[in-house]
Image (spheres, rainbow, N blue to C red):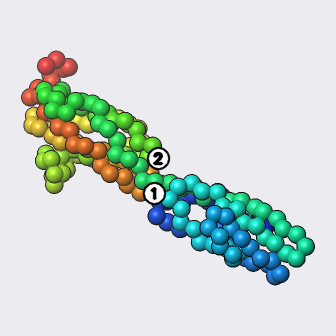
């Protein structure tokens, strides 16, 4: 019996497990009850499958794990607080990590619908610093990306930049 190597798939995908059939062998899979040497599976959660191969004289079992990855959940924005005013550039934006994320797309726009994105960064951390702001209101959000693609964007927060001019480090 050879169920094959453990495999990871994204939620909604399928994979073939098992190996080509051998002459004079019969096969039975659990869970599922398939009776072929190879089966296509599409579990929604991590699942271990066991195949039993039987001949007229003996039988043997082997198992394979199919791990299911998901798109990352939306992160929660943590700072600055939604609606923060009079921020002095550069502005550091922070958020919680989203399990399964490898990078985050941070977008800053002048409108809450993000039709006019003025700055963006792809980062691996849970913080990013931006400068070069005019003294107006901005909207920002964070979209996580992982092995299975981009997740949902976070809620949208806003902040307003202070009308400050720095000369030699003094306001």
| Disc 2/disc 1 C-alpha distance (Å) | 9 Å
Up/down of 113 relative to 15, above or below: above
| Rendered residue at 16%/17% (across/down) | 170
Q: Earlier in the sequence, mark 2 or mark 1?
A: 2
Q: Secondary structure at mark 1?
A: loop
**Residue at mark 1:** 148
61 left or right of 116?
right
In this rendering, does residue 11 appear at all? yes
Secondary structure beneath disc 2?
loop
For the C terminus, the quadrant is: top left
The image quadrant of residue 140 is top left
Residue 122 visible in image: no
For the N terminus, the quadrant is bottom right
Q: Are marks 2 and 1 in contact (CB under 8 Å)?
A: yes
Tell which residue pokes out farthest to the top in this image. Answer: 170
Q: Residues within 10 Å of mark 1 (few under 14, many from 20)?
A: some
- Taking depth in this image into account, of 165 and 57 the one nearest to the observer is 57
Residue on which the image places disc 2: 100
Q: Which mark is residue 115?
A: none
The residue lying at 18 percent from left, 51 percent from top is 114
Q: Position of residue 115 (x, y in %)?
A: 16, 54
Image spot of residue 12 (x, y percent): 46, 64
Which residue shows up at 34% across the image and 46% down it? Answer: 74
């Amino acid at each position: 019996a050879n169920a094959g190597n453990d495999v990871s798939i994204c939620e909604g995908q399928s994979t073939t497990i098992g190996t080509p059939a051998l002459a004079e062998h019969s096969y039975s899979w659990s869970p599922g009850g398939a009776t072929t040497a190879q089966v296509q599976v599409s579990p929604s959660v991590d699942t271990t499958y066991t195949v039993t191969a039987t001949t007229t004289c003996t039988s043997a079992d082997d198992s394979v794990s199919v791990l299911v990855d998901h798109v990352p959940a939306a992160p929660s924005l943590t700072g600055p607080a939604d609606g923060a005013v009079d921020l002095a550039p550069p502005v550091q934006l922070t958020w919680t990590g989203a399990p399964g994320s490898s990078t985050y797309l941070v977008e800053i726009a002048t409108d809450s619908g993000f039709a006019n994105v003025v700055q963006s960064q792809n980062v691996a951390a849970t913080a990013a610093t931006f400068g070069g702001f005019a003294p107006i209101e901005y909207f920002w959000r964070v979209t996580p990306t992982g092995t299975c693609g981009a997740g949902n964007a976070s809620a949208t927060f806003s902040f307003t930049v202070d009308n400050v001019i720095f000369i030699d480090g003094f306001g």
